[in-house]
Image (spheres, rainbow, N blue to C red):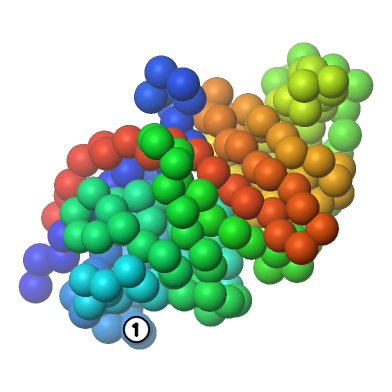
Amino acid sequence: MTIEVSVVRVFTDESGEHGNALGIVRAEDVGESDRQSLATELGFSETVFFSSDGSAHASTRIYTPAVELPFAGHPTVGLSWWLREHRTALDTLTVPAAELRVRYEADTTWIRAQAAWAPTFTPHPMGAVADVLATDPASFTDGHHYVWAWDDEAAGSIRSRMFAPAMGITEDEATGSAAVWITDVLGRDLRIEQGRGSVLRTTHTPEWIELGGTVAADKTIYV
């Protein structure tokens, strides 16, 4: 059986460049026992397997090349955007961790999350953006590591990179769960530039953190 995989780039910059590739697959096309192996074969930092009846609610499971995740940011933002483009706009999206609220604002897709749903990241605050850019991914052999520095503290802008050998990800281009986590740590709205230049935005309240970004269609592949 041929499986269709739609690929989008999540958290593109203001020019539509960069972004983290996401594989999107209909859950009905792949049995649960085969999903991890397909995600490993595809090699994206995350692949989602979604179910939707065409209403404003959908559900999904999320896999890295090595493990299934209860929550992740770039897959939920990316899938919510894709479903609006191809089926219908969402109000809610269910992942194993919880039911997420979804909203759309112009070209930005937002999901609402809790920092407790994110993995445990080891923080590596740096003194300057140049130190972040000079970090060697080979320095990390296990765990989830977030390297960051203020780009403009007054404006709430940081530069970051994320390394997650425990997830089978040497370096992640744009990490929504890490953005939620660092927003909770710093207690303020943020603009985060990660990886080669992907852009994530967050808003902070005592109850919730919203994660938003822009998404671009990339390609469709068949496996």
Residue 15 locus on image (x, y percent): 41, 18
Q: Is residue 132 visible?
A: no
| Residue at (40, 23) in percent of width and height | 17
In the current view of this chain or complex, which residue is farthest to the right? 127
Identify the residue under disc 1. 32
Looking at the rendering, which quadrant does residue 117 occupy? bottom right
Taking the image as shown, residue 91 lies to the left or right of residue 111, namely left
Residue 163 locus on image (x, y percent): 67, 44
Taking the image as shown, residue 200 lies to the left or right of residue 136, namely left
Pick the front one: 195 or 101: 101
Residue 114 locus on image (x, y percent): 70, 64
Judge the density around disc 1: few (<14), some (14-19), many (≥20) Cα neighbours within 10 Å.
few
| Residue at (48, 25) in percent of width and height | 13
Which part of the image, by quadrant, shows the C terminus? bottom left
| Residue at (53, 56) in percent of width and height | 111
Which part of the image, by quadrant, shows the N terminus? bottom left
Looking at the rendering, which quadrant does residue 138 occupy? top right
In the current view of this chain or complex, which residue is farthest to the top? 130
Q: Could you say whether the residue bearing mark 1 is in a helix, strand or loop? A: helix
Looking at the rendering, which quadrant does residue 3 occupy? bottom left
What residue type is disc 1 on?
Glu
Pick the front one: 205 or 162: 205
Q: Is residue 187 visible?
A: yes
Residue 176 locus on image (x, y percent): 59, 49
Q: Is residue 162 above or below residue 196?
A: below
